[in-house]
Image (spheres, coloured by chain):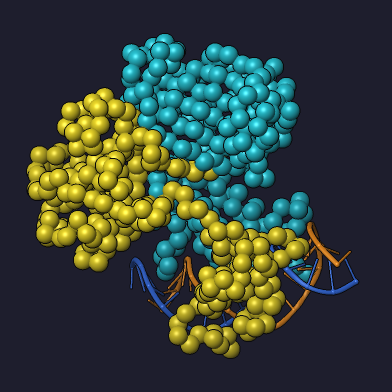
Chain colours: A cyan, B yellow, C blue, D orange
Amino acid sequence: MNMRGRNSGEPAYRRIQRTIRRRIESGHLRPGDIVDSERELARTHRVSLMTARHALADLAREGMVERRHGAGTFVAPPKIHFNKLMSYTEQMAARSLTANSRIVSSGVVNREQEIAARLGLPPMSRLVRVERVRSAGDEPFAHEVCYLSADEYHGLMDAPLERTSLFVTLEREYGVELAYADEEIDATDADQKIAELLALPRGTPLLRIRQLIFSTKGRATVYVLGLYRSGRHTLMIRRFR
Amino acid sequence: MNMRGRNSGEPAYRRIQRTIRRRIESGHLRPGDIVDSERELARTHRVSLMTARHALADLAREGMVERRHGAGTFVAPPKIHFNKLMSYTEQMAARSLTANSRIVSSGVVNREQEIAARLGLPPMSRLVRVERVRSAGDEPFAHEVCYLSADEYHGLMDAPLERTSLFVTLEREYGVELAYADEEIDATDADQKIAELLALPRGTPLLRIRQLIFSTKGRATVYVLGLYRSGRHTLMIRRFR
DNA sequence: TAGTGGTCTAGACCACAGC
DNA sequence: CTGTGGTCTAGACCACTAA
């Protein structure tokens, strides 16, 4: 008797969430606006109260809406995405800047023992190494070197990394879904080589980020060593108690 | 007919969570161990399946347990607390180091317009300003200046901040619960004054963190400007996709 | 196959907000 | 007062996992 709406295999509560999300994203519903109540959603979508409730509680959990006991459910103010793992391309898009990336060098190395270890590989593993300078507009502001297992991602060096982001390539070509990254952050200064690549005086303070990116399966997949020019692009973090 | 177990006003699902949490924290249940199933919990706690389910789904959401479809619910491996807002004292304790803090100066200022603005106060507001040097063992490694509204926290300057942490003082003496902090991170180098305070050569790269701490009520409460010696104490962050 | 989590029903009473 | 979200019942069928 139940499972009435189970046509396309999509759970009812997800279908409800989609309709609400669409109304918010399209601008029909604006921050602060009241959302249909549990009872209203139950009626219009012909589901039970618990199901409508599930949909709303879930949306509230991810910060899309805000529930106020006795008052209703309201569209939450748009969130700045803190602590989000984003590709360079995505970061630039979020600030509505044009991404610009130049490959300085790429190749295969096999003597990076420490990095191999961080990737959970044997000491002398062959690693794809891609060195890039990233710019916002004309101004170079970051130097990044990334490493991946050459055995697993050997075709990567032929990929058009100058146009397509590494994240997208991994997800599309290799079916690897990236889940999270641990980052180690400290400060250093520009040596001769970096100074030239970033067009800075030697000794300029730089933010150094060592990033280990994990897949959804918990596998360490990419190691990135980044040096970022301070000032124009600061790192934002939100910490919770 | 329902509400049977509603004696102390505590929801049933929370009571169930408590019993599971206790068994995990006491070591009776270890990571990887299987937890009572929904049906088992429903029987033993004399609640419906949905209620038992609510308890488990909630615990899974906060990372205490892990649910595997068709297999069961298992105790999740202990989590390293990434992106946690911690006081200096707590951070040191987490690394089992002795916290050591020296107040360089403290007083009230009223011309820090930008900081007042960040705290959501009028431009010329009076602010308590406390300047400290923090050490691990003998080695000074951080310079922190924090600001709070002088009107709201005027007694703070008499507090024994050298022995009791600012967090604890705020929570105990003023009933302020801190919830989260937004941090702006970049790199700079030591000027003459900082070099002396941290016993470093001038020009040494430093991590600079501007931290705005919010209360549970969403009020900006403390502003901290910190300079951290690089190397021995690096910042760890986890970002999620 | 037995047991588990995932989704869902058609209701119920309570606590709270706002008029 | 009405309407809201918060909690809860006593079941149901499905999809999945492991023996």
- Residue B120 in percent (x, y) is at 22, 47
Residue A135 coordinates in the image, percent (x, y): 45, 18
Q: Residue at x 52, y 78 (%)?
A: B15
Image quadrant containing the C terminus of chain A? bottom left
Q: Is residue B51 left or right of residue B165?
A: right
Visible residue check, residue A10:
yes
- Residue that appears at 9% across and 48% down: B108
User: Foreground residue, A228 or D11?
Assistant: A228
State left or right for residue A156 relative to residue A196: right
Assign the N terminus of chain A to one quadrant of the image.
bottom right
Q: Residue at x 38, y 35 (%)?
A: B231
Residue B69 in the image: state x and y as whole percent. Answer: 73, 60
> Residue A63 at what x, y percent from top left?
48, 52
Q: Is residue B78 above or below residue B228?
A: below
Q: Relative to residue B152, is residue A170 depicted above or below?
A: above
Placement of A61 over or under D7, stated as above or below:
above
Q: Is residue B43 above or below residue A125?
A: below
The residue furthest front is: B138
Foreground residue among B102 and A219:
B102
